[in-house]
Image (cartoon, rainbow, N blue to C red):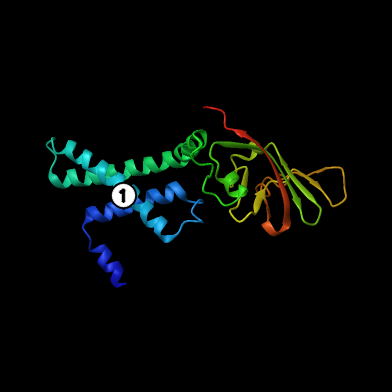
Amino acid sequence: MDQLRELLSLPITTLSLLAAGYLSYRLAYIGKDTQHKTIDVIFLVFVYAFVARLSAGMVGAALMKTTLSPPVVQVGASLSGMMIALCVAAYWRKWGESQTFERLRYFNISFSDRHLSAWETVISKPGIEYNSLIIRKTDGSVLKSENLGQFNGLPFGDTVLGNDGSVAMYVTHFKGAGISEWSERDPSAYLDWGEKITIVPASAISEIDLRARKEPPR
């Protein structure tokens, strides 16, 4: 509690920079931070705080040339710095990270994407459109979800790929163990209740097949 009081007693400018750094870090790495250590979090927060500080300084210098009062200039500069840091974080998450790793591979500098497993690489790849999903379970049964785009507007999207290897899917076809023919299932059978989503824990999955492509340009 004493540490919280000390933190809250910091100047408002410092608090705004720390808030901008942390919010930007969360935006850039949420769902991708399982391997981050404390030192990684601290330095990444400071990287985005630096972006916010630099941006706020430039905006503040421009606003000082206007007739605005100093308090208004300070608030405007701080908010602008935070927004710019968040935009940088959003760009890094959407395009910057993948583009950076592609450049490193192209120039034979590094072939690592910092992920420890192929599954992490698959679920964190941005700009991917999934079209079909097949899950083979450890009990021999098989679940399939076809034409995933039809589920895009639902609360959980077309599918959920968990960091722990679990999967949530809308099952459209099913095969029991030892059965060769698919039987159709309608996840919208009770449409007034909402579509039925099936959650398969990682321990029950033996193999996952995904059919995907890059999202077409808009």
Q: Which of the pair 37/90 is nearer the observer?
A: 37
User: At which x and y percent is residue 31?
Assistant: 51, 51
Residue type (three-letter) at the residue carrying disc 1: Ala
Q: Which of the pair 16/32 is nearer the observer?
A: 32
On the question of residue 199 being in view, the answer is yes
User: At which x and y percent is residue 122?
Assistant: 60, 44
The N terminus appears in which quarter of the rendering? bottom left
| Left or right of 138 on screen, residue 94 | left
Q: Residues within 10 Å of mark 1 (few under 14, many from 20)?
A: many
Q: Would you name the residue on which mark 1 appears?
A: 49
Residue 159 sits in quarter: top right
On the question of residue 155 being in view, the answer is no
* x 19%, y 46%: residue: 74
User: Which residue of the protein is positioned furthest toward the bottom in this rendering?
Assistant: 2
Numbered disc 1: secondary structure: helix
* x 26%, y 41%: residue: 55
User: At which x and y percent is residue 45?
Assistant: 36, 53
| Left or right of 202 on screen, residue 39 | left
User: At which x and y percent is residue 130?
Assistant: 63, 38
204 above or below 99?
below
| Left or right of 15 on screen, residue 116 | right
Q: How many marks?
A: 1
* x 58%, y 53%: residue: 163
